[in-house]
Image: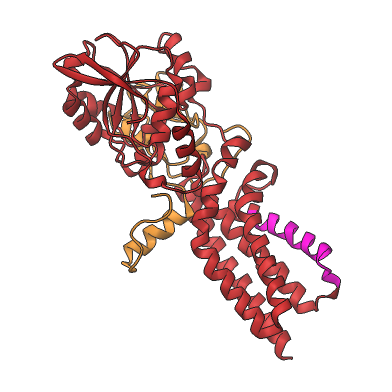
Chain colours: A orange, B red
Amino acid sequence: MKGFKYLKDVATLELDRSLCIGCGRCLEVCPHQVFRMQDQRAQLAEKDACMECGACALNCPVAALRVDAGVGCASGLINEWLRARKVPGFGGGGCG
Amino acid sequence: MPGFLGWLQAGPGRVARIGSGLSVADHLGACLARWGVNRMNFLVPPGLYAIGQPTPEAPVLVTANYQMSYDLVRRALAGRDVWLLVLETFGINVWCAAGKGTFGTEELVRRIELSGLAGVVSHRRLILPILGAPGVAAHEVKKRSGFSVVYATIRADDLPEYLDNGQVSTPAMRELTFNWYDRLVLIPVEGVLALKSVAPAGAAVYLAALLLGGAAVAGSALIAYLGAVFTGIVVAPLLLPLVPVRSFAVKGALCGLLYSACLYAVAGGAQWSRPVALAAFLALPAISSHHALNFTGCSTYTSRSGVKKEMRLGLPAMGCALVAALALVVAAAFS
């Protein structure tokens, strides 16, 4: 994204090019232009720009994409962590 | 419902016609929601709506039932004849609802059926916001409902251009931004949400300083604390692209250091004892850092793995800084 860069080498996005059918859906849904079409197949062009929203993996009709998708939000992660450990009083909060 | 004009006979039933103009109440509701007031109840009934006088061939656009989303879309579509399918996202905006899955395949397929859309329009094409894609599997929707999904634009404001462009997206319509105004409007609700933790923490700071140094010290400590909170919630997000590091926690800590230096200069730091000055330079940046890290939830480009990494490294560092600062002031008070 213009003017903004997040941490390097952390994104969990993986593309299995051998499965790709070149439909271009990942290019259509990615708001950070992570993909590029090369030889009629998708290619990871800017992996570090991935925010792991999961749109590409969910919309890939041949499941060629894999990503540990979720929201990049500190309080969301804390709530998730507390919920997983069943700490009482934490069921939601944050952004709703 | 907001913008209701009347009923339109469509297919086997009738569809609510809505206008594109926003009333004072709509604007006020949006403004209050930005401050966290009635934010979770700022919603409209899900279902199919008509804007203008749409025919069975008219495009169908899809949005969430957060009223701010619904209002932005209907305002952008002024003067058009289109259908608007509003999904039940329980008053959450498209992007966050897609992340949770409520703006998702299940709800979309269900809403297509419940609204009788197939009997209202002659085509089988839905226009979705790009930020709805994390919740919707287009190929699944096609398989289950017969409707094909296209992801059109990120911003509602680009919809007129998209429709005029033969329903083809341009690269600019697909690109996320995060300009200073985008960030500014997110700050009030962050501040309101933070009050829940800032109020008790502020009280604790005040009491601790009162016990250690008296009323005047307690007042100063509280003001110093609140300044660090303000630096993390307001200053760091606004200066976001100007602080030359990638990590939000480090951005916050750097802003906090700057704030500490300003405080030292303005509030007569030269008279502070050395342990107190050191404690201020440790604790205040840690507090700013914590709040800046929380802004990752508002940002449009942070990833889950990245935030996890920041928390893994940042939270222990913040904790150590606070404990060290506390140890310093306690030791100084009793020495």
**Extreme-right residue of the structure:** B270
Q: Quadrant of the C terminus of chain B?
A: bottom right
User: Is residue B290 positioned above or below A50 on the image?
Assistant: below
Query: Who is closer to the viewer here, B13 or B140?
Result: B13
In the rendered image, residue B260 lying in the magenta stretch gets the answer yes
Q: Is residue B255 left or right of residue B320?
A: right
Report the side of B144 relative to B313 (left or right).
left
Whole-percent x, y for residue B320 in the image: 60, 72
Quarter of the image with the N terminus of chain B in it: top left
State the image quarter where residue B153 is shown. Answer: top left
Q: Which residue appears at 34% of the width and 15% of the height?
A: B82
Q: Is residue A16 visible?
A: no
Q: Magenta residues: mostly which secondary structure?
A: helix
Residue under the point 54% across and 43% down:
B186
Residue A63, compared with residue B123, is above or below; it is below
Q: Quadrant of residue B273?
A: bottom right
> x, y percentage for residue B236?
65, 50
Question: What are the residue bounds of the magenta stretch?
Answer: B252-270
- The residue positioned 57% from the left and 73% from the top of the image is B203
Q: Is residue B319 above or below residue B3?
A: below
The image position of residue B164, as x and y in percent, is: 45, 9
Q: Residue furthest bottom?
A: B335
Numbered-mark total: 0
- Compare residues A69 and B107 and report the one nearer the observer: B107
User: Is residue B176 magenta-colored?
Assistant: no
Residue B225: x %, y % from top left:
65, 66
Q: Residue at x 66, y 79 (%)?
A: B209
Horizontal side of residue B204 vs A43, given as left or right:
right
Residue B109 seen in the current view: yes
